[in-house]
Image (cartoon, grey):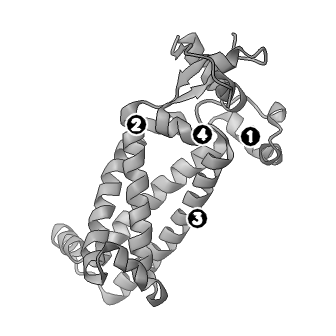
Amino acid sequence: MSTHDDGSGAHLRVRRYSGSARINHWIVAISFVLLLLSGLSLFHPSLYWLSGLFGGGATVRWLHPWIGVVLVVAFIGLFLRFFAQNLPERTDWVWLARIRHVLKGDDEYLPEVGKYNAGQKFVFWSQSILVVILFITGLGLWEPGLAWVEKTFAFKATIDQLRIAALIHASAAVIAITIWIVHVYAAIWVRGTFSAMTRGFVTGGWGWRHHRKWLRKEVDEHKTDRPRVTPAE
């Protein structure tokens, strides 16, 4: 194993994400930001000015649900790609128990983790649940969607049920936005993470420091190459 502190990890390049996975991720990411902005414009009168980014309130009202459909379809693809690698492991609980060392950057006190650590798995599963909640409640708030649900399941939604759906939808959206902010911050905070989703590769040094168990597996399966020397991230 040559990806340790002798510096050889800086010479090693490992594929973190395929091109299709990166495209899938960015479709979800862009859709989420568009939903965030258009949704906020409908959330409170003080934020209605955001509707101008989409051509006005009338446009936002029909566009927001369709962007949601795009996100759901793209997220299903993302879920199918990554759910197996986000299943809980015993080391996740150890990682969480040592969260103070994570925040301090004391990697020597942390267990070796696979492709994703417990924090990343939390983001994955929480957003998966929230996307389902937002989709179901969003159908009730979208006239064509509500008509389809009422016809398919042969029931008539009451005003109180629609109000509850609106409350749950707004609450789930706020939680999803909060988790997204943490996700983006972490991607910027951990140097090399953001470029992994734009370029698809990480250095051996990055993998050794942050996802050592995953790196060992990649090296054992010969999924690495050695391009020109670049500094470890």
State whether residue 142 is above or below residue 220.
below
Residue on which disc 3 sits = 178
- Side of 23 relative to 181 (left or right): left
Q: What element carries label 1?
A: helix
Q: What element carries label 3?
A: helix
Q: First in sequence: mark 2 or mark 1?
A: 2
> Residue at point 48% right, 69% down?
173
Residue 157 location, quadrant? bottom left
Q: Dot 4, crowdedness within 10 Å: few (<14), some or many (≥20)? A: many
Q: Nearer the viewer, mark 3 or mark 4?
A: 4
Q: First in sequence: mark 3 or mark 1?
A: 1
From the image, which quarter does the C terminus lie in? top right
Measured Cα–Cα span from mark 3 to mark 1? 22 Å
Measured Cα–Cα span from mark 2 to mark 1? 26 Å
> Residue at point 44% right, 68% down?
36
Measured Cα–Cα span from mark 3 to mark 4? 19 Å
Amino acid marked by disc 1? Trp
Q: Dot 1, crowdedness within 10 Å: few (<14), some or many (≥20)? A: many
Residue on which disc 4 sits = 193
Residue on which disc 1 sits = 95
Spot occupied by residue 147 in the image (x, y as percentages of width and height):
18, 75
Do the CB atoms of the residues marked 2 and 4 lie less than 8 Å apart? no
Q: Is mark 2 on a helix, strand or loop?
A: helix
From the image, which quarter does the N terminus lie in? top right
Q: Which of marks 1 and 4 is in front?
A: 4
